Image (cartoon, rainbow, N blue to C red):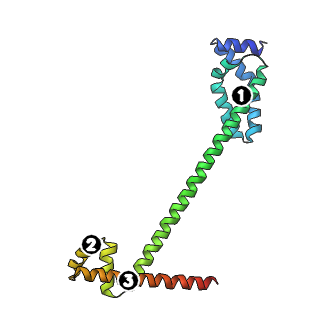
């Protein structure tokens, strides 16, 4: 049986068979330690494959100052630590993304609720205020444009919009007070 040092030397010289023998000899060690560190079979398999793929390049760094198995333990442990850090980072990014999506959905739901409330409030107003509010707020028309459509002066549209704001504010304050009373 050829010793590890000889196989490493031959593998570093480009001998694929020597490299293959090294992998066969130490694959279980790499997998076993990876599994113990990661505590997950699929992750340990991925880690072992990653190490095996990069091992030909890493073997060039093996100095022979210790047994190859000692060096492989170090390589495997370092790779497992890196794997766990990457996994934690990915998990954190995923959680942050989910939190952001939840906030976005919450904001969208709140906006929708606010818009529905505003339309209900506008619909409860007298017709002249309701029509003015729909043209200015919902359609985004300038007061002058709304005045032309409604056949009133621009100042009248501005006055009506002030009344719309007052009405909406009164409704909001009334609802806030009602909600505060209910919480007591």
Classify residue 56 by image quadrant. top right
Q: Between label 1 and label 2, give the one nearer the viewer.
A: 2
Q: Position of residue 151 (x, y in %)?
A: 20, 82
The residue positioned 57% from the left and 55% from the top of the image is 98
Above-or-below relation of 72 to 2: below
Residue 13, quarter of picture = top right
Secondary element under disc 2, as helix, strand or loop, is loop
Question: Could you say which disc has been placed on residue 75 in the image?
Answer: 1
Residue 31 at x, y = what percent? 73, 32
Q: Mark 1 or mark 3: which comes first in sequence?
A: 1
Q: In the rendered view, does 139 fall on the left or right side of 82?
A: left
Q: If the image is split into quadrants, where does the C terminus sit?
A: bottom right
The image quarter containing residue 178 is bottom right
State which tag comes first along the sequence, 2 or 3. 3
How far across and how far down the image is residue 4, in percent?
76, 16
Cα–Cα gap, marks 1 and 3: 71 Å
Label 3 secondary element: helix
Given residues 35 and 71, the one toward you in this image is 71
Q: Which residue is mark 3?
A: 123
């Amino acid at each position: 049986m050829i010793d590890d040092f000889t196989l490493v030397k031959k593998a570093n010289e480009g001998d694929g068979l020597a490299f293959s023998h090294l992998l066969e000899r130490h694959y279980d060690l790499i997998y076993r330690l990876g599994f113990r560190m990661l505590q997950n079979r699929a992750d340990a398999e991925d880690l072992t494959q990653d190490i095996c793929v990069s091992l030909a390049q890493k073997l060039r760094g093996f100095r022979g100052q210790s047994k190859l198995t000692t060096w492989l333990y170090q390589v495997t442990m370092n790779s497992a630590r890196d794997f766990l850090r990457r996994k934690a980072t990915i998990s954190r990014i995923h959680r942050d993304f989910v939190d952001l999506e939840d906030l976005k959905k919450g904001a969208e739901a709140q906006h929708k609720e606010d818009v529905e409330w505003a339309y209900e409030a506008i619909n409860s107003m007298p017709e002249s205020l309701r029509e003015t509010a729909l043209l200015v707020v919902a359609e985004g028309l300038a007061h002058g444009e709304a005045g032309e459509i409604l056949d009133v002066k621009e100042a009248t549209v501005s006055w009506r919009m002030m009344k719309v704001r007052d009405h909406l504010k009164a409704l909001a304050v009334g609802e806030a007070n009602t909600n505060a009373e209910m919480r007591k």
